[in-house]
Amino acid sequence: MDATACNGSKDSSPIFYLVGIPSLQEFLFLPVSFIFLFFYLLILVGNTLILVAVVAEPRLHKPMYFFLINLSALDILFTTSTVLKMLSLLFLRDHYLGFSACFLQMYLFHGLNCSEAFILVVMAYDHYVAICRPLHYLVLMTPQTNAALAASAWLTALLLPIPAALQTFHMAFNNTVHIYHCFCDHLVAVQASCSDTTPQTSMGFCIAVVVSFLPLLLVLVSYAHILASVLRISSREGRSKAFSTCSSHLLVGTYYSFIAIAYVAYRADLPLDFHIMGNVVHAILTPVLNALIYTLRNKDVKAAITKITYPQDPGHSGDP
């Protein structure tokens, strides 16, 4: 679309109107908002418990749990950056978002999304070293190395969306921009612009490839080596322990599928609601899975949480 066709004023910033889920009937707003609120509170409570448990329990001061608290912090920030506005939209019917606020939300959503994808790669590498090179684990996974890996995942991911966000920021928009989504997503904002959207759409697709397919490939390679090593373990108990260590992380590997579906779907001729729900499910379900999997399936984390919850009660223990 030609930018000259815009009716936006150069003296004022556009206002973004979040349409939400177009096919969602108004009488369903309240039930859906309570569902979103329930999941949001579950994410906050679950990941906060993980953070407190790992920090407070000296036995959990290990590389695996160091990366886990990074993941938990990311989940809290990632979900908060989107769900609060979604709740405001559904509860208060507050559809409007300022120009700068929209782009801040866009940047945080994609930056934190990328960070989580890279942290999962680092966690896969940690599992690879622990199982495939156990004798070198303490040498390879030093506190300095762990901090460098985590910092690299955060910084790289937070820098990656900046070019796309800045270019979108300088695109031409009408005075009131209708965003067919529950929050400001990059490609939806691009499609609402009056400018030529081809460069931005291509850039978004390339970022999706970097954030989903490349990390997924690295995770699959790591776990292929892990599987080969596990199958060589003669002890049945040893194999069971190794599989148990990695099973949670493999389940969270569905994260990359959500990213791929959410972005690649824009290239396909699919209903609008499919795009919106894909991103909404990705923004809520993955952090919920992280919190549930790493609290319910991890005996060490459960024991630490129980110790914090019942500090004076000898009748409670972390053992199942």
Image (tube, rainbow, N blue to C red):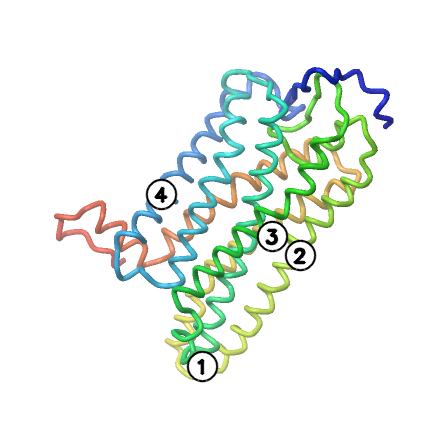
- N-terminal of the pair, mark 4 or mark 2, is 4
Residue located at (57% from left, 63% from top): 219
| Label 3–label 4 contact, CB within 8 A | no
- N-terminal of the pair, mark 3 or mark 2, is 2
Kind of residue indicated by mark 1:
Ile
Q: Which mark is residue 256?
A: 3
Kind of residue indicated by mark 4:
Thr
Q: Nearer the viewer, mark 2 or mark 1?
A: 2
- N-terminal of the pair, mark 1 or mark 4, is 4
> What crowding class fits label 3: few (fewer than 14 Cα within 10 Å), some (14-19), or many (20 or more)?
many
Q: State the CA–CA distance, disc 1 to disc 4.
A: 36 Å
Q: Which of these two is toward me, 91 or 205? A: 205
Q: State the CA–CA distance, disc 3 to disc 4.
A: 23 Å
Picture coordinates of residue 23 (x, y %)? 66, 24
- N-terminal of the pair, mark 2 or mark 1, is 2
Kind of residue indicated by mark 2:
Phe
Q: State the CA–CA distance, disc 2 to disc 1.
A: 30 Å
Residue under pointer 1: 233
The kind of secondary structure element at disc 1 is loop
| Label 1–label 4 contact, CB within 8 A | no
| Label 3–label 2 contact, CB within 8 A | yes
Q: Residue furthest front?
A: 11
